[in-house]
Image (spheres, coloured by chain):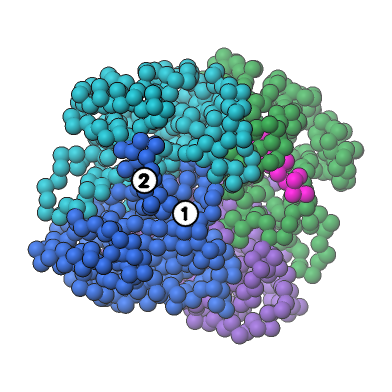
Chain colours: A blue, B cyan, C purple, D green
Amino acid sequence: MSSTFGKVLTITTFGESHGPAVGVILDGCPPGIPLDAESIQRDLDRRRPGQSAVTTQRKEPDKVEVLSGVFEGVTTGATIALVVRSVDARPQDYANLKDLFRPGHADYTYWKKYGVRDYRGSGRSSGRETVGRVAAGAVARRILEKEGAGVQAYTVQVGDLVAKERDLEFAEQNAVRAPDRKAAVEMEQAILKAREAGDSLGGVIEILASGIPAGLGDPVMDKLDASLAWGLMSIGAVKGFEVGEGFAAARAAQGDQPPQRVAGLR
Amino acid sequence: MSSTFGKVLTITTFGESHGPAVGVILDGCPPGIPLDAESIQRDLDRRRPGQSAVTTQRKEPDKVEVLSGVFEGVTTGATIALVVRSVDARPQDYANLKDLFRPGHADYTYWKKYGVRDYRGSGRSSGRETVGRVAAGAVARRILEKEGAGVQAYTVQVGDLVAKERDLEFAEQNAVRAPDRKAAVEMEQAILKAREAGDSLGGVIEILASGIPAGLGDPVMDKLDASLAWGLMSIGAVKGFEVGEGFAAARAAQGDQPPQRVAGLR
Amino acid sequence: MSSTFGKVLTITTFGESHGPAVGVILDGCPPGIPLDAESIQRDLDRRRPGQSAVTTQRKEPDKVEVLSGVFEGVTTGATIALVVRSVDARPQDYANLKDLFRPGHADYTYWKKYGVRDYRGSGRSSGRETVGRVAAGAVARRILEKEGAGVQAYTVQVGDLVAKERDLEFAEQNAVRAPDRKAAVEMEQAILKAREAGDSLGGVIEILASGIPAGLGDPVMDKLDASLAWGLMSIGAVKGFEVGEGFAAARAAQGDQPPQRVAGLR
Amino acid sequence: MSSTFGKVLTITTFGESHGPAVGVILDGCPPGIPLDAESIQRDLDRRRPGQSAVTTQRKEPDKVEVLSGVFEGVTTGATIALVVRSVDARPQDYANLKDLFRPGHADYTYWKKYGVRDYRGSGRSSGRETVGRVAAGAVARRILEKEGAGVQAYTVQVGDLVAKERDLEFAEQNAVRAPDRKAAVEMEQAILKAREAGDSLGGVIEILASGIPAGLGDPVMDKLDASLAWGLMSIGAVKGFEVGEGFAAARAAQGDQPPQRVAGLR
């Protein structure tokens, strides 16, 4: 198992759903970046389930603690360790899964690969692993901000509902994080309706990066496109990745007008 | 610049368009795999431009030479080096590009990043870098075959034309490698028509892997999905990647019937 | 900064002297290895300062906690996280070092490299970083034991005093871990005498590995010799490494009889 | 097998003794470094066997060819590939080794590990693998020179004969590369005498680096000491490594005067 991602800034996550803690180690963060638990907490709070009616109902306060790499309010250039204790870990809730393999949770694959069953909420393959990624992302965001760059992600599709507007301020003000007032309401209703039916809905996220200097990333094997794809596709639920025009480029003759979103990463 | 990809089988490519040679180094190939230049050559010949009217017209015989890692017809477990000399390298053909930056060829990005212009056919960012990948892929195919696994790729879309059949045998018998007799003819005509207009067309490739054992790949950061995305998105022209249902999964409620191609990698 | 070592079993340490915690993340540990906090604790207790008159006097209970990778008493194949909270962290004790650079503690090098001063007991370059290594080593020891292999280290030189015997059982029963009853007493006295004079003494450690199968390690760049040298020389205080005959091989003609310790790793 | 070393400048060697070619791929070389085959050739010529009576008698012209990464006399920042064709490869000379395992050549270890015998002069474990390292080192030397840094290595011991002087200019003017006129003559005679007896002699090399800026290297796992140890110990014949005082530091109380060579890397 490899839990390490990245080459310049390297992150290593740890922890299972319903284990005692999850977290992340970062190497390669420059010194002198202002960083405290509060600023990381803000991003963790955005991730946290149980915030609204439309997300997983499990309560996780997810308080982050900085164990190393920060001294007197700034990063020192040393290894950063961030840990979040699990306060809602109830392995007994999963006892009924001991002999059941849930589809889409990697239960069967883990068992075939390792011959060991950690039936507590999918263990390491749980979405809870992303707590470490989000905490690391909060640090990365501080580094980008210092360089004048920024990244914003928002929901552009839920089921068949597609956001048409790109009101990025509004995207932060609704439960589904959609940048479209009308679509946001419809998406929320569709999610609640699917849940009533014992189901859930997929979606599409758009990520907009701004202030990125020309030449960022490395050519050949570590192209920025490839690194982004690697990182995003390593999240269990992600099944597709496009950059720029993406699959639409197949249809377009080169002479076509590029769409407005060509500058962004989708 | 990193030219290395992979963790168990590691490949490192080298060489520029219109430089003296391109090639690849492989580490991690098991010993005892039957391998000779001829079997690698077959895959290189499939890649070779100038085979038909629909591809790039440059002539490249692309004869591969095995410099290490093979003894008495089998791999030894040692580092494999494969090199292809350029016989059609004509840097002077590109002299008119010395002061021109071509769109979509990374010319500007390289110049911003390195401050040096290698104007000979885009240098390292040229599609010719994939000669090393194809040669490495031929070795990987031998390893997979020994394990009873196989991989086949074919063209399912060119411009707006979509293949509806999946006649995988026929896919190897037409110039556009489409698995659909009707679509193959239309695709070829569309490409020629675009070329007449001084343009080109995009497309979509589908990759079908068979005989893959459960548990292949590593959880968390090096998921098989993520590694495939990393590798494929590091090819310059690739702008999107889907696995299984891909983006279509966003639309489908979980209770929907999976389509037939769900077992494949798309 | 890279805090990661190893390729098959990968360890990533974190934490500073006098920060809130130190620890380690391990990836690549096979599933099914019996592991609990107690067995790791035994190795940490061997490392712990303040055990006897001859070591650093700082008290560190160093209680290890297993945060992930172990379920129902065995490893699951998943990422293992081990953390040790600092209970004796007294940054204020180091306030007098705020404007002083101590020799041999990397204080000046860190300041030149990062432009930031973490004056709390040398921060990341402190010997306390090895808590993570020892905890990881305890896990590695469990893996080796399962394969019938073992590793023992002991002190063969302190200052000018050289151990002549190799009583490996006795080595675990004296404060300086020397495998020689007479030398052990002399070494202890020499250390106490140096301390009275406000000084300390260097030494030489011998490591004996047994049950190692032929072909372990990788040829060329990751030779076992090279990997061991990398790991051991990355401990701040280590300034030399020999394997087998080591430097003595320079003197010996090849026809000479090998010494008894040739089978060990020194 | 891993043939890759280094993190900022990464080298990957390939090729076997008596295979068609040996060489190296470099990634991470900055753009704008003046580089041509001639300057690399100078370092390869220093390595070349058969130069004098005291070295291996095999003749290897070892002409290097630059296959990529250099355009108009300077590095472009792209992957550098260097290859040396074998003109003296005579696998048939080794036919008598087909059923013999030579001591000290890794013959037995390879056979146990890979189950395949490449009996042609030890294949990949041959000293000929270092052709790639020397070629890479020649490129690294150009980079260091641009930064005002330099590295020189010389022989300070052969058998029991120890060089007392450090005449670094003279070191380049004698067959054993000793920096001591008297020792150089004695060393040469000792080597010839050992050869007459069908034997050979070990030795000690001292490496002096100058102009190295404070803070070079990375703390914790990739300390400069550790990286140098990794690289040097991965050369088959190297059995020991010291930096600064090395093993002598064990004997010295900290109050002792440092020897003159403390600034160098030994």
Residue D136 shown in magenta: yes
Left or right of C69, for residue B208: left
Residue position for label 1 = A6
Type of secondary structure dominating the magenta stretch? helix
User: In the figure, D37 relative to D86: above or below?
Assistant: below
Q: Residue at x 32, y 77 (%)?
A: A61
Q: Is residue B253 visible?
A: yes
Farthest top residue? Answer: D92
How far apart marks 1 and 2 lie (CA) works out to 25 Å
Of the residues shown, which amino acid type is indicated by label 1?
Gly
Residue position for label 2 = A245
Of the residues shown, which amino acid type is indicated by label 2?
Glu
Image coordinates for residue B65, horizontal then vertical, percent:
50, 20
Residue A50 shown in magenta: no
**Observer-nearest residue: A168 or C13?**
A168
User: In the figure, D177 relative to A218: above or below?
Assistant: above
Q: Residues within 10 Å of mark 1 (few under 14, many from 20)?
A: some
For the magenta stretch, what is the residue range?
D135-149
Farthest right residue? Answer: D182
Q: Earlier in the sequence, mark 1 or mark 2?
A: 1
Residue A187 found in image quarter? bottom left
User: In the figure, A62 relative to B253: above or below?
Assistant: below
Q: Residue at x 44, y 67 (%)?
A: A138
Q: Chain of mark 1?
A: A
Q: Chain of mark 2?
A: A
Q: Residue at x 39, y 74 (%)?
A: A42
How many discs mark residues in the rendered view? 2
Image coordinates for residue B4, horizontal then vertical, percent:
49, 40
**Observer-nearest residue: C119 or A44?**
A44
**Observer-nearest residue: C143 or B132?**
B132
Q: Are marks 1 and 2 in contact (CB under 8 Å)?
A: no
